[in-house]
Amino acid sequence: GAGVSQTPSNKVTEKGKYVELRCDPISGHTALYWYRQSLGQGPEFLIYFQGTGAADDSGLPNDRFFAVRPEGSVSTLKIQRTERGDSAVYLCASSLIAGGQETQYFGPGTRLLVL
Amino acid sequence: AQSVTQPDIHITVSEGASLELRCNYSYGATPYLFWYVQSPGQGLQLLLKYFSGDTLVQGIKGFEAEFKRSQSSFNLRKPSVHWSDAAEYFCAVGAGYQKVTFGTGTKLQVIP
């Protein structure tokens, strides 16, 4: 069906506020990834889910960042006490787990601006 | 730690000319290598990937890339560029498909 969708497409918040970014993966994809892309940079890995559990969260920059995927489908990236340095495009991707041939399909991203 | 270097920040080519985008990687074992394209307002799209086998890999949209272990390179090529190829191109490396490290990208401009 449809590709990976992310909401909102843009989010403006004030320093210190809490934000949630949502990712709807491709139906049936068991793996889900979050990346952060700062201006002029390539995407930076944040966290990877297999099913409901975080298989690798080593890219989360600090404990203000947290992500969940409670039912193994939709995922939410949560950022507490936002800082101006958190401003970036947050990308989500999903993939099938199929014998080591998983291709990641990316969503359009959420552009976060922290004022 | 794995890393990727894309030495060209910006490249301009004429429509119909050939293209080569450079990518050098650092990784301790045989890497998984990828090229993605990102157009304005669109998500990243996989052009091609390499993990084993033939070192010359064919991708979508007429792109190909060659894995050269001795040079730690995975350069992207296209024999004849179209105006619609203008975009940003990212090379990426990983131990598998999961935790992938991207380069900083090369912006391609195509002039008539």
Image (cartoon, rainbow, N blue to C red):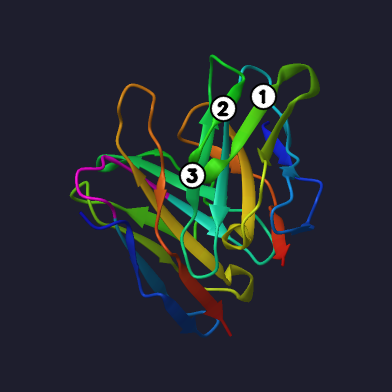
- The residue that mark 2 highlights is B57
- The residue that mark 3 highlights is B46
Q: Are marks 1 and 2 in contact (CB under 8 Å)?
A: yes
Q: Position of residue B82 (x, y in %)?
A: 61, 57
In reply to whether residue A30 is colored magenta, the answer given is yes
In the picture, the quarter occupied by the N terminus of chain B is: top right
Q: Say what secondary structure mark 1 lies in.
A: strand
Q: Which residues are magenta?
A: A25-33
Q: Within the image, what quadrant is residue A15 found in?
A: bottom right
3 or 2: tag closer to the N-terminus: 3
Q: Is residue A9 above or below residue A106?
A: below
Left or right of A32? Residue A90 is right
SS majority, magenta: loop
What chain does mark 2 sit on? B
Q: Say what secondary structure mark 3 lies in.
A: strand
The amino acid type, in three-letter code, at marker 2 is Val
